[in-house]
Image (spheres, rainbow, N blue to C red):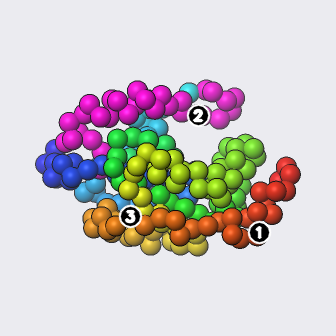
Amino acid sequence: MGEFTARHRVRSTALSGTPGTGKSSVAARLGPTRRVVEVAALAGGPSSARPGRPVVDVDLARLRAAESRKPSALRADVYVGHLAHFLPCRDVVLLRCHPLELADRLDKGLRGSRADRRENVAAEATDVILLEALSLRRRVWEVDTTDRSLDAVAREVRTLLDQRPPPRFGRIDWLADARVTDYLLRPNR
């Protein structure tokens, strides 16, 4: 346990965001001194809720309770996933991405069905995860990943984890971009 003990006494942080914003890729670059755990791994792995696509069914209440019962020395430093902000974390680093770039990322990776990809773009455009985190009274830092390298984003996330500055959110307004509104209003894109 050695090197993790001091960090676990501080607090766990959620690295959350809409699918495609770069959570897992950024988490992989946070360094060996942090215990990073994917929410999907805690939830027990894939199930077959949809044909041809592995899906993880998560009982959030049960998962939150299980993580809350763990001694702080056994909790993750960073929980990663689009549901991570629901876990017992005071702090949330929320990765954001311009919805049109997110649509391109999701389409290139063919992540989910067309309807799922469109739903994720709409969720990003309308701040769904930000609003969920704030409703849970989390301290939130938004990090825009649009047109940025993974290394640059990982450096910013590491700085936030190390320094814990005052929360920073609410500066991103994707709906102010008419192209985003146009995308959302186009049927069956």
Tell me the residue at 18%/48% (across/down).
Answer: 9
Q: Per the image, is 51 magenta?
A: yes
Q: In terms of secondary structure, where does tag 1 sit?
A: helix
Position of residue 90 measured from the top left corner of the image (x, y, whole percent): 33, 49
Classify residue 35 as left or right of residue 186.
Answer: left
Tell me the residue at 29%/34% (across/down).
Answer: 68
Crowding at mark 1 (Cα within 10 Å: few <14, some 14-19, many 20+): few
Q: Which residue is mark 2?
A: 55
Q: Cβ–Cβ below 8 Å for labels 3 and 1? A: no
Q: Earlier in the sequence, mark 1 or mark 2?
A: 2
The answer for how far apart the CA atoms under marks 1 and 2 are is: 31 Å
Tell me the residue at 47%/64% (across/down).
Answer: 169
Is 67 situated above or below 102? above
Q: Cβ–Cβ below 8 Å for labels 2 and 3? A: no
Q: Which residue is mark 1?
A: 179
Question: Which disc is residue 110 wearing?
Answer: none
Question: Which disc is residue 167 wearing?
Answer: 3
